[in-house]
Amino acid sequence: MPSAGWRASSAPGVGKPDWKLAWKRLVNVVYRMATFQPVFRFRFWSSLFHGLVGWGLIFYVLVNLVEVAKGFYLDLSFRVW
């Protein structure tokens, strides 16, 4: 059971959010997601393959998001070359 101090400090509507901390955390999350920092620790090869699977999934999602954007906005064009 949480202590009384914990309940009082996390009460809704009390205080203001620290946006500097929120942006710092967001940048940290994006960095950790892109580099899979917690994955690469002890075993190199299994970590590398785990990273490749994750990066492939991220690439797959990005490609599908572009296709959805093209589907909703017919005049949208992405030129690679």
Image: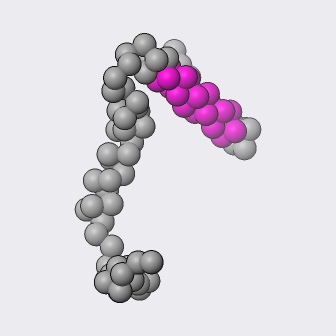
Asked if the magenta segment contains residue 63, the reply would be yes
**Residue 64 relative to residue 51: left or right:** right
The colour mode here is: one colour
The number of callouts visible is: 0
Quarter of the image with the N terminus in it: bottom left
Q: Residue at image x 35%, y 32%?
A: 37
Residue 14: image location, x then y, percent: 36, 86
Q: Residue at image x 33%, y 60%?
A: 22
Residue 75: image location, x then y, percent: 68, 37
Asked if the magenta segment contains residue 35, the reply would be no
Nearest the viewer among 76 and 43 is 43
**Residue 15 relative to residue 81: left or right:** left
Residue 80: image location, x then y, percent: 53, 19
Residue 60: image location, x then y, percent: 61, 27
Q: Is residue 76 visible?
A: no
Q: Which residues are magenta?
A: 50-69
Identify the image quadrant of residue 15: bottom left
Q: Residue at image x 35%, y 86%?
A: 4
State whether residue 59 is above or below residue 6. Answer: above
What secondary structure is the stretch in magenta mostly built from?
A: helix
**Residue 3 relative to residue 59: left or right:** left
Q: Is residue 80 visible?
A: yes
Q: Residue at image x 41%, y 78%?
A: 2
**From this viewpoint, which residue is outermost toward the left?**
20
**Residue 7 relative to residue 71: left or right:** left
State whether residue 38 is above or below residue 22. Answer: above
Nearest the viewer among 44 and 71 is 44
